[in-house]
Amino acid sequence: NFRIAQFRRWMLERKLQDAEVPAEEQNNILKHLEKKETEYMRLQRHKMGVEDFELLTIIGRGAFGEVRLCREKTSKSVYAMKKLKKSEMLRRGQVEHVKAERNLLAEVDSAYIVKLYYSFQDDEFLYLIMEYLPGGDMMTLLMRKDTLTEDEAKFYIAETVLAIESIHKHNYIHRDIKPDNLLLDLSGHLKLSDFGLCKPLDSSNFPNLNEPDYTPGKGAKPLPDNTSRLTNSSAPKRTQQEQLSHWQKNRRMLAYSTVGTPDYIAPEVLLKKGYGMECDWWSLGAIMYEMLVGYPPFYSEDPMSTCRKIIHCMHDIGFT
């Protein structure tokens, strides 16, 4: 480790000299990085545990545990602690998904992905210590503003594109791109979160992933195997204003219902015909539509009707 640190310092000195950075500024940069290196080495020697953190407010609950604010006792830095119950993950067969989430966060280094700082476990729980983003999520922003301007939508969509691209480059598929998984930092920049449904892809199964255990949303139930139920719709027609009004009233309740919302799910996922990374881009398109119009493109009063609309859309344009 010491030799690696020396090599990194030598490489940095070379880069600073090549960039003709003034000597005083070079010294300041090197001193700052030496301090960071010392702190990193200290953390490497110390095995982190839940006792190293002061537990604060709960900010979210999920199927396997909770997310709460915490403060690291030594540095006083504030993080989000994701606490997952091992027995529940085993019971629901979600161990591989959690491993994939942890591996993705450790592997992908992007300014548009929520950062993982530490991970550890005890007999009962697995803990992920992650970046705390105090700006809320995209769903909350849309609830407050109803729609975004074209420039605002371009900004957030561009940052989401960079986030999705960064995980696709590492051969992961997110599979749950939706507004409540797009978080905002203190300065308003967007970061992708919640990789509980992410899936690593390799050359043997890309681009056709067909996995029967995929279920959308928080606590969602599986979609029906009989896709013929999705092809007959008797839902009443609504005007655009009626659609907008109903969605605004029910959006948060629908997103966190036991069924979950299929509004952002690609048709190939619904049809269980095999799918790949392109399903993340479909979800992003649905989010962009909602940003500009005020509700998702296939929104209906109940999830089954939404699924029908998505499937009918693909029939209409000749893709199914």
Image: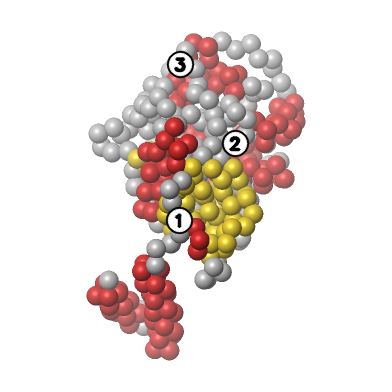
Q: Secondary structure at mark 1?
A: strand
Q: Classify 10 Å Cα crowding around label 3: few (below 14), some (14-19), many (20 and above).
A: few
Asked if residue 172 is positioned above or below residue 276 in the image, the reply reads: below
Asked if residue 3 is positioned above or below residue 243 in the image, the reply reads: below
Instruction: Give the x, y percent position of residue 19.
Output: 35, 79
Identify the residue position indicated by label 3 in the image: 225
Q: Residue at x 59, y 58 (%)?
A: 55
Number of callouts: 3
Asked if residue 51 is positioned above or below residue 83 in the image, the reply reads: below
State which quarter of the image contains the N terminus.
Answer: bottom left
Q: Residue at x 47, y 36 (%)?
A: 88
User: Residue 45: which quarter of the image?
Assistant: bottom left
Callout 3, which amino acid? Asp
Callout 1, which amino acid? Leu
Identify the residue position indicated by label 2 in the image: 289
Instruction: Give the x, y percent position of residue 174.
Output: 44, 40
Badge 1 or badge 3: first in the primary sequence:
1
Q: What is the spatial separation of the Cα atoms under label 1 and label 2, in whole angstroms?
A: 31 Å
Residue 4 shows in this picture: yes
Frontmost residue, 86 versus 165:
86
Q: Secondary structure at mark 2?
A: helix
